Image (tube, rainbow, N blue to C red):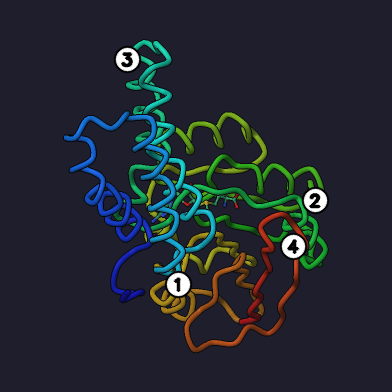
Amino acid sequence: MTRGRFSPALISLFLLLAAWLPLLPLLRLGWPITGLIAMQGGLALLLSRWSGLPGWWQLINAFFSPLVWLVSHAGIHPLWFLAGFALLALTSLGSLKTRVPLYLSSQNAVAEVSRRIPASRARVLDLGCGLGGWLAGLNAARPDLSLAGVEMAPLNWLTSRLRLRGKAEIRLGSLWDEDLSKFDVVYAYLSPAPMAGLWEKIEREMRPGSLFISNTFAVPGREPDETVELHDLSHARLLIWRR
Ligand SMILES: C[S@@+](CC[C@H](N)C(=O)[O-])C[C@H]1O[C@@H](n2cnc3c(N)ncnc32)[C@H](O)[C@@H]1O
């Protein structure tokens, strides 16, 4: 299967539907739906493995139809689904365009960055600050720093803002509108999608002597000056460039 041209989410959806196709005639023959759902889960898992999807997409495909069936029989009020969708939209709808979902830095990422910022009063920016956890951790470890974050998802922004009141300046908006020349350290935990464009912005704006730190995601064709394994649950690492 051609990888790279299509996102794993799209491939996964396609395989999920494809796994139903051979089972539809059995449905018409009156086979019990629960048995067919179990067979569909198994087939979706096989197709996902064959196509080389990452492990967690394979699991999603294996359990998607069984979970939909279970939930639809659990007597849950429809408003809960609407609430779930609203929550997802307010935290993550923008990721359909930016291709940067919400996931959170570990405390190891805070500790490793914290000990690499020597100067007191250094200005630090988190590009896409999510729920503000990384900034909150940094503030606890290094109250001497001047912290800022920018976030485009409204609920994430509000959470960060309330959490960091008086401790960091949190702006609602796009990271592309930030002036990076104002900061000594810029931190980003994004995705592969924006990294090439972000590097161009960094080269244009960041001052000599400043640090750019990417959690996990590489800049195409630019080796970092330092790589730090974080030994956390997601096997993340920090990639550090000195300007
Ligand atoms: C992977 S999360 C990282 C959250 C936080 N920095 C941390 O390390 O815990 C990425 C965040 O970036 C935000 N984001 C993605 N693209 C953005 C953009 N163009 N401008 C501002 N925020 C963006 C997303 O909404 C998401 O909350």
The one of 38 and 195 positioned closer to us in this rendering: 38
Question: Dot 1: what SS?
Answer: helix
Picture quarter containing residue 131? top right
- Distance from the alpha carbon under mark 2 to that under mark 1: 27 Å
Residue annotated with mark 1 = 195
- Where does residue 84 sit, x and y in percent of width and height? 40, 26
- Distance from the alpha carbon under mark 2 to that under mark 4: 10 Å
| Cβ of mark 2 under 8 A from ligand 1 | no
Residue annotated with mark 3 = 78
* Mark 1: amino acid: Met
- Identify the mark nearer the N-term, 4 or 1: 4
* Mark 2: amino acid: Arg
Position of 78 compared to 49: left or right?
left
* Mark 3: amino acid: Pro
Question: Dot 2: what SS?
Answer: loop
- Identify the mark nearer the N-term, 2 or 3: 3
Badge 3: how crowded within 10 Å, few (<14), some, or many (20+)? few
* Mark 4: amino acid: Val
- Where does residue 15 sit, x and y in percent of width and height? 31, 56
Badge 1: how crowded within 10 Å, few (<14), some, or many (20+)? some
The one of 106 and 20 positioned closer to us in this rendering: 20
The one of 145 and 198 positioned closer to us in this rendering: 198
Residue annotated with mark 2 = 142
Which residue is drawn at the image coordinates 42% and 68% (left, top)? 50
Position of 136 compared to 98: left or right?
right
Q: Nearer the viewer, mark 2 or mark 1?
A: 1
Residue annotated with mark 4 = 113
Number of labels in the image equals 4
- Distance from the alpha carbon under mark 2 to that under mark 3: 45 Å
- Identify the mark nearer the N-term, 4 or 3: 3
Q: Are marks 3 and 1 in contact (CB under 8 Å)?
A: no
